[in-house]
Image (cartoon, rainbow, N blue to C red):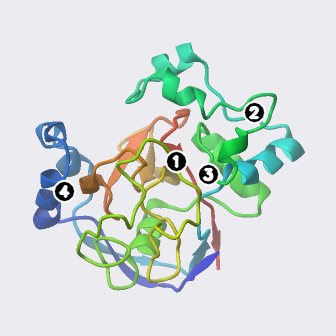
């Protein structure tokens, strides 16, 4: 786990950052006003010290949890997938991530676990003696003490986050984002559940995923999903009080 000292941290985004993000996103994102509607105005928040996992929970990590607790394996039917919305990808894309016989896909063991809802993520973290991070903790770990737009600085560097791809990647790859505080892979690969509420009865997810444009891959980006959502774009990592 990465240790984050207590103190004041910057969260949110201003007009210049959002304009850059719209310029580096599909035109539909600007038309729908994602970043203005969802992101917080810039502010400082004071956080107690905490620790956060250096990488997302992997399929193999989660398999041990399922084996020891009999928790439902990551899976969703075609009908349930259609019903929950937020499709983005056809069910054919989902199939490669479905567990079979209680076991994850053999070629994805070191990839982030997906198709888990917020309740699954909370249960795993509790099993580890941990908890889900709040969205402010997640963003503080992403930005570092000096409030960077990206974990590595204020300018986008192609290849530093696993995005604009066709699927998840193993955690800990050398081309993943290395934060100034030592956090690995905190942007790209999968969105991550937090324990924070989003504009009502939804949970805030942070980060960006393997299929996202560059504009969404910023520490400030946030959006919300129903707590029961199971998707190939969403995983999680755990945190713990200092």
Q: CA distance from mark 2 to mark 1?
A: 21 Å
- Residue extending farthest right: 68
Quarter that holds the C terminus: bottom right
User: Which mark is drawn over residue 168?
Assistant: 1
Q: CA distance from mark 4 to mark 1?
A: 22 Å
Task: Relative to 240, say whether 25 is above or below.
Answer: above
- Label 2 belongs to which residue? 72
Do tag 4 and tag 1 residues touch (Cβ < 8 Å)?
Answer: no
Q: CA distance from mark 4 to mark 2?
A: 37 Å
Q: Nearer the viewer, residue 26 or 108?
A: 108
- Label 4 belongs to which residue? 21
- Label 3 belongs to which residue? 111
Q: Nearer the viewer, mark 4 or mark 3?
A: 3
Which badge, 4 or 1, comes first in the chain's sequence? 4
Which badge, 2 or 3, comes first in the chain's sequence? 2
Do tag 4 and tag 2 residues touch (Cβ < 8 Å)?
Answer: no
Q: CA distance from mark 2 to mark 3?
A: 19 Å
Q: Nearer the viewer, residue 97 or 180?
A: 97
Task: Relative to 69, say whether 11 is above or below.
Answer: below
Q: Where residue 12 sits in the image (x, y, percent)?
A: 27, 65
């Amino acid at each position: 786990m990465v240790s984050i000292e207590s103190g004041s941290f910057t969260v949110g985004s201003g007009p210049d950052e959002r304009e850059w993000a719209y310029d580096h996103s599909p035109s539909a994102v600007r038309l729908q006003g994602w970043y203005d509607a969802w992101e917080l105005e810039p502010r400082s928040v004071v956080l107690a010290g905490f620790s956060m996992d250096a990488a997302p929970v992997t399929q193999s990590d989660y398999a041990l949890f399922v084996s020891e607790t009999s928790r439902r394996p990551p899976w969703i039917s075609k009908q349930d997938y259609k019903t929950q919305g937020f499709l983005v990808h056809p069910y054919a894309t989902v199939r490669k991530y479905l567990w079979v016989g209680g076991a994850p896909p053999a070629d994805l063991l070191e990839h982030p676990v997906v198709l888990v809802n917020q309740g699954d993520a909370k249960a795993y973290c509790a099993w580890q003696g941990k908890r889900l991070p709040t969205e402010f903790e997640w963003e503080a770990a992403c930005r570092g003490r000096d409030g960077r737009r990206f974990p590595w600085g204020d300018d986008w560097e192609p290849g530093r986050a696993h995005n604009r791809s066709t699927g998840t990647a193993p955690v800990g790859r050398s081309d993943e984002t290395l934060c100034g505080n030592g956090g690995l892979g905190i942007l790209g690969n999968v969105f991550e559940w937090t324990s924070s509420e989003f504009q009502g009865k939804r949970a805030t997810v942070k980060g960006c995923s393997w299929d996202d444009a560059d504009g969404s891959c910023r520490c400030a980006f946030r959006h919300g999903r129903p707590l029961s959502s199971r998707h190939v774009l969403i995983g999680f990592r755990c945190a713990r009080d200092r």
